[in-house]
Amino acid sequence: MTVALEMVSDLVCPWCWLGLRRIQAAMAEAPEVEVKLFFRPYELDPTIPPGGTDYKSYMSARITSPEGRERMAMMRQALIEYGEAENIPFRFDAITRRPSSFDAHRLVRWAQGQGKGAAAKEALFTAYFRDARDIGQHSELVSIAREIDLDPDIVRDLLASGADTDAVRAEADTFREMGISGVPTYIANRRVAVQGAESAEKLVRFLRHAASLLPQERPSGPPA
């Protein structure tokens, strides 16, 4: 049983880091299902400028009411607790920049082509949520490429050249046009989907259900 699983996510989404850990746990718990995992780009806020913006000012502008700030504080505390269970060290108070995640998605695309997609996702999540690094900066992305054993000189040149900009933007737009409005979203064999950082147990059931369906259109790999 083979499942081509597309994980649509953003690199500045804390739920997506949880989702990555949980889908990996689900894959380990359902070894009878052969899962080919592909990472797909999504920008929660594509209006962020390439240089990013001040994090506190950005969040203050989005959440203006006392009730909203209270809900945000509660959500962050819940995320910290969920993260502790998954060995994810969220450090929201250390974040100073809200970066554009677009170029980070380009890095994931190139890493995925080298069989390092999961390593790139993990490194980028760690850089942003644990180390408060600005993953919108090319210098940081080149450093992260080096950390996962990609050639930093090639990545530097690709970033500077604008390589795959149109392809990544078109791919992200495709998922919006499909109606995806929240991430993480998992799409199995382009037939069934589940949205949200669901538990590993629920994702195991999802994978097994997807594997039981007749095959339809299945992506063979990262888009060219």
Image (cartoon, rainbow, N blue to C red):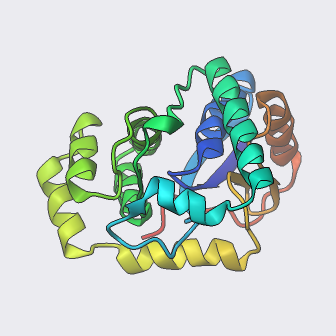
The single residue placed furthest to the left in the displayed view is 153
Depth check: 39 or 47 in front? 47
Residue at 39%, 42% in the rendered image: 116
Question: Looking at the figure, which quarter contains the N terminus?
Answer: top right
Tell me if residue 93 comes above or below residue 62 in the rendering: above
Instruction: Give residue 110's quadrant in the image.
Output: bottom left
* Count of numbered marks: 0
Residue at 42%, 42% in the rendered image: 128
Depth check: 187 or 15 in front? 15
Relative placement, left or right, of 2 versus 42 is: right
Residue 44 in sight? no
Tell me if residue 22 comes above or below residue 125 in the rendering: above
Tell me if residue 80 comes above or below residue 173 in the rendering: above
Relative placement, left or right, of 154 versus 113 is: left
Relative placement, left or right, of 57 versus 113 is: right
Relative placement, left or right, of 17 versus 119 is: right
Residue 112 coordinates in the image, percent (x, y) = 41, 50
Residue at 72%, 52% in the rendered image: 186
Question: Looking at the figure, which quarter contains the C terminus?
Answer: bottom left
Residue 19 in sight? yes
Depth check: 38 or 220 in front? 38
Residue 94 coordinates in the image, percent (x, y) = 43, 36
The single residue placed furthest to the front in the displayed view is 66
Residue 198 coordinates in the image, percent (x, y) = 79, 39
Residue 211 coordinates in the image, percent (x, y) = 81, 44
Residue at 28%, 42% in the rendered image: 144
